[in-house]
Every structure is written in structure tokens, then in C-alpha cells.
Image (cartoon, rainbow, N blue to C red):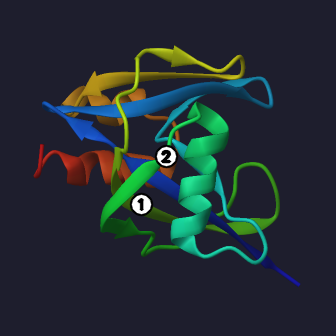
Amino acid sequence: MKRFNVRIYGLWLDGGKVLVSEELIKEHRIVKFPGGGLEWGEGMIDGLKREWREEMGVDITIHSHFYTTDFFQPSAWDDSQVISVYYRVQPVKSVILPYNNGAEHFYFVPVNEALQELISLPIDKVVARRLLYIA
């Protein structure tokens, strides 16, 4: 039986820039939006808040839904279909950036045409294109 891989991401926009995360996944350098996998028993909002707390030690406010995958995307890592959900977020308290947690590096990049080339994951590339219209 095939399975779904539900991912949840936060888009923190500030002054024409967006926060990205850089990490090594299976020997590949990946630049993506901050977030990760939804765990069993979690709702989207709780999962997103947990991911940001785990990765950056930051509590966030969720402002609005931004995008949900609307096409078939097979996983690059296993035999699943990826569904990604993106929300616009804002940290509750100030955050010092760039930030490195030992596994991931977080930093702001401009929202422009180059963002689509910088971002690694296919669904994130769609989101990067959509961000051009609001940044």
C-alpha cells in the first residue's frame, strides 16, 4: 500500500526577505523553508509550532495559510507521496539570525527570481514563485 508524507512549513517574511533552512539530508545539501514532518496525532498548526520549537527554540504565531500542494509529488527519499502545507508565521519574540542548531543553518534571503534556484525541493520552488507576488 502506498502512503502519504505530510510536511508542514512556516514562511517568515521580513522586509522583502524570507527565512530558509540549510541542512544535509542523506549527503545532499538542501535549502528549504523551515519545518518538517507532521507526526501521528498532530494537527497542522501544532505540528508547525513543534517543528519551529525543536529546530530554532522559537514560539511562533500563525498568520494565515499560504499554500498546499496541489499536484502529485513523489518523495525523493522513500516510496511515498509528499503533501506540503505552508503557513505565514511570525516569531513571538525577537530571534537572532543567522542561527545554527548544529544540524541546520537558518538565514534570510531576498524574495526574488534567484530564490527559485536556491531552493532545493520541488514543492518549495512552487512556493518561491508564489512569494514573488506578495513580497
Is residue 69 visible from the viewing direction of this image? yes
Q: Quadrant of residue 114?
A: top left
Relative to 77, say whether 94 is above or below.
above
For the residue marked with disc 2, what is the amino acid?
Asp
Q: Residue at x 39, y 46 (%)?
A: 125
Q: Is residue 114 left or right of residue 95?
A: left
**Residue 88 versus residue 33 in the image, above or below:** below
Residue at image position (56%, 44%) is 52
Residue most toward the front?
93
Q: Is residue 34 above or below residue 23?
A: below
Query: Farthest residue toward the bottom?
Result: 1
In the picture, the quarter occupied by the C terminus is top left
Q: Quick check: 120 left or right of 18?
A: right
- Which numbered tag is attached to residue 8? none
User: Is 95 left or right of 52, judged from the image as shown?
Assistant: left
Report which residue position mark 2 lands on: 59
Mark 1: few/some/many CA within 10 Å (<14, 14-19, 20+):
many
Alpha carbon of mark 2 to alpha carbon of mark 1: how far?
A: 17 Å
Specify the label residue 86 is tagged with.
1
Q: Whole-percent x and y of residue 127?
A: 33, 53
Q: Residue at x 75, y 66 (%)?
A: 39
Residue 117, position in %: x, y? Answer: 36, 30
Q: Position of residue 38 (x, y in %)?
A: 68, 64
